[in-house]
Every structure is written in structure tokens, then in C-alpha cells.
Image (cartoon, helix red, strand yellow):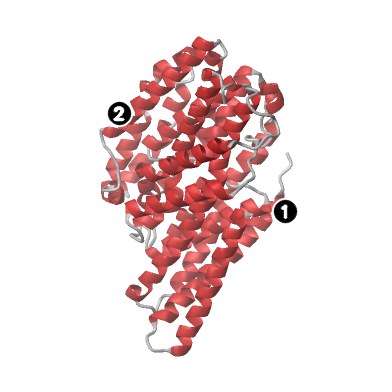
Amino acid sequence: MEHVTLLIGIVIITALVFDFTNGFHDTANAMATTISTGALKPKTAVAMSAALNLVGAFISVQVALTISKGIIDESAGVHPEVIFAGLVGAILWNLVTWYAGLPSSSSHALMGGLIGATVASVGLAGVNGEAVAEKVLIPAIAAPIVAGIASLLATRLTYRIGRDADPKATAKGYRAGQIASAGLVSLAHGTNDAQKTMGVITLALVTGKVIAPDANPPLWVIISSGMAIALGTFIGGWRIIRTMGKGITDIQPPQGFAAQTGAATVILASSHIGFSLSTTHVVSGSVMGAGLGRKGGVVRWSTAGRMLAAWALTLPAAGLVAAGAALLADQGTWGVAVVALLAAAGCATIWVASRRKPVDHTNVNDGAVDETGVVTTAIAAVTPPPAGSLPADGLTATIPAPAGTPVAPVSPTDPAQATA
Amino acid sequence: MNIDWAALGSVLGVSLAVTVGLVGVFTLGIVGLSKEGAVAARTGAYAAFAVCAAAVAYGIYIIVA
């Protein structure tokens, strides 16, 4: 460890911050429906999810050093500055979407960041465009469809079988079922996503020649990655939990059970068969499917539309911010320092903005009553943070994408929201 | 572009079958338990829960392995 340079140290800290935002962002995937149906108290739910994420980080031993699954040419393109810039892009986009309460894929943010940083630093040749379509675009379209159909049919079936039963008598059973499948999602998340950070840190150590290329990640890497993701999960991205659990559709216990079981099944089936799907996309699709599966169930398409817009923007937005960061960081030590300072300032700005109308475990289930408020908040939400972080990337003109585009899909759906 | 339709198809097929199957079996279980006094329903319910527990165990096995 005595060979860890300042730059590698900064990369490691940034990777752990990303890991934290990853856990924070994805708590909703496992626990949103469990919380909104009241199967678990909010604090209990995030504590359970955090514990299972931590366990998940330790039980799987395969750490992928190919963090980008062949999308970028890691042997040619990756040096610590690029990894650092990619992480900065991913972190900022994760925070912007969290502030807007939109579930978006942390893996897409990381990939987008790495792609953007690689293009800025090495050029287009460092990126495999076909792989982007194969590994990112197609799964992003497939995931919500597969999960949505499975959960829709399962919801129909469970309502049909249970139609003569007394809801009070079955409530306990649905509660247990939801907790079990939410637990599986948490465990799978810990094994997959904590691994990503371990891979990033290990790659940084390898490129910095601190450890040998074929070495396993040191124990402190495994422990710190597991702790960071668990802490992020425990702090809980309540804004996203509210959107997922209340904003898309009103979830009842049988729907929550069907949605969560469908999500757990699709996640495990896809990782087992080798057609990897993003947890966020799967769970969002499941919740929509469950919403459509109940008679009288309503999916709020305006919320779903905003969510889809955020998904489409994740890769380019994180990529643009990362590209700007990479151009700066490649200038040398001062560039890295400037990027680090601007990133910290951007994070602080978003956090301060979020305190104006905080969402936490006490009001996480109030989403539905405040629906117009949610929309206006989301519009207001999407606008200020990039403006606040304007100095962060003003030099490289990366602001327009994150600032301008998310607003566009929101406005047309707004009247529909008001009349709904 | 080389989309692995076979893998995508199997993910869809397996997900549909397992989700609908498990949710169905589990619901039969909780409906069975909600009928008071029926011994056959109760036994069937426990059998259904055993199937679901086995599925969860297999899920954990997939995660760990």
C-alpha cells in the first residue's frame, strides 16, 4: 500500500463515493414496494436491504476486471484519470436523478461515464460501438418488457386465485412473500453492484502498478466496497423509493408480491442465462406490470415517461460530464484537483437543494397525495442542479444535455397529470 | 449487431414460467391457510410453501455460485 499515489487514492475514494450513491439509488429496487404496501416499516426495510447487500458483497468471489464488459478497450484506453473522470460523471448523474426522484440505472451511469471519459481522452477508437448497442441498449429495452409481462400475468393470477379469500387472512402471507423476494433482490444487488466497485478499484490499482494484473482484490477493497454500498442502501434514496412505490402506480400487497417476485426471478434468470439486465429497469417494469395487472389499477404514464426519459439520458449525460472531466483531468495534477473540487461542489449543491423539500422515512409514503407537488418538484428539481453545477463543466459545454433535456419530456405530460 | 435472441428468449420464457408458477403456488398456499379448519387445505398450503422455499433456496444458490 505504500505505493499508492495521490491520484490512485483519489480514484479509490471516488469509486467508494460512486458505490455509496449506487446503494443509495438502488434501495428502491428492492424495498420500494415493500415499504409502500407496509409489509415492512421504512427503517426496517432499508436496514434489512443494507445487511443483505453487505452479505452479498462478501459471498461472491469472482471480481470482474472487465468493468465495462468489452465496451471500452481497457488495455489501450484506461488510465487512472479516465477512471476518475468516468466515476465523476456517474456520481453527478446519480445525484441529479436522485434529486428528481427518478430511478435510473447506476450501471448505465458508470458505463456512460467510462465511455465519455474514454472518448474524450483516447478518441472514438477506444469505444466499441456495437457492444454499446448489444450490452446496453437492447437489454434496456428488453428488461422492462420481460419483467412487465411476467408481473402482469402473475398479478392477474394471484388476484384470480385469491378472489374469494378474505384479504385480512391473506395479508400476512403476502407480507412474508414480499419480504422474501425483496431479500433476494437485495442479495443479488450486493453481489453484482459491490463487485463493480471492487473491479474499478482493482483496475485502478493495477493500472497504477500497485498490484499485479492478475491479482485478486485485496481484502480492504472488498470490505470497503461492501461497507460503502451497505451504508448507501441504509441511508436510503427516499425520493426514488417514493416514485417507485407510490408514483408509478398504487401498489397493494398482492401486486407488491407479484412485482417483487417477478423482479427477483428476472434478475436471477438473466444473470444465470447470461443476458444481463439492469436491476432498475427490471424492477420499474415489474411495478408497471403489476399496476396494469390489477383491475382498476392505474399506471401514471407521465411518471413512467419521465423515468424512461431519464433512462435514455443516463448514458449520454453521464458520458458528457465525464468527457468534460476527462479533458480537465488529463491536464495534469491541477486538472484532477479542479475536477475533484467541482465534483464536490456539484454534489454539495444538489444536497443543499434537496434539503429544501426533504423526503425521508417519515414521509416516503405520502407521494400520492402530493402528486402535482411531485411533478412541479421534479421540474424544479431537474432545472437547478445542473445550473448549480454550471461552473463544474462550463468550460466544456456539457451543461445543456443534463439541464435542458429532462425538462422537455416533462412539460407535455403535465396537463395530463393535472387532469388525471 | 449480434443480438443473442436465444438467450433473450430463454430469459423471457424462464421468467414468465417461474414468476407465474411461483406466485400461483404461493397464492394457493395462503388461500389454503385462510380457510379455517380444513385439514387438506392446510396440508396443501404447507406443500405449496415448501415449493416456494425451495425456489428461494435455489435463488440463493444461483447468487452464491
Task: Tell me if residue A257 comes above or below residue A338 in the rendering.
Answer: below
Occupied quadrant, residue B16? bottom right
Task: Tell me if residue A300 comes above or below residue A117 in the rendering.
Answer: below
Instruction: Name the residue carrying label 2.
Output: A352
Along the viewing direction, whichever of A130 and A121 lies nearer the viewer? A121
Task: Tell me if residue A13 comes above or below residue A296 in the rendering.
Answer: above
Q: Position of residue A121 (x, y in %)?
A: 62, 18
Which disc is residue A66 wearing? none
**Of discs 1 and 2, which sits in the foreground?**
2
Instruction: Name the residue carrying label 1.
Output: B6
Q: Secondary structure at mark 1?
A: helix
Along the viewing direction, whichever of A84 and A251 lies nearer the viewer? A84
Same chain, labels 1 and 2: no
Q: Position of residue A406 (x, y in %)?
A: 43, 32
Along the viewing direction, whichever of A190 and A320 lies nearer the viewer? A190
What amino acid is found at the position of numbered circle 2 in the picture?
Val
Residue at the farthest front position:
A2
Circle 1 residues within 10 Å: few <14, some 14–19, many ≥20:
few
Q: Chain of mark 1?
A: B
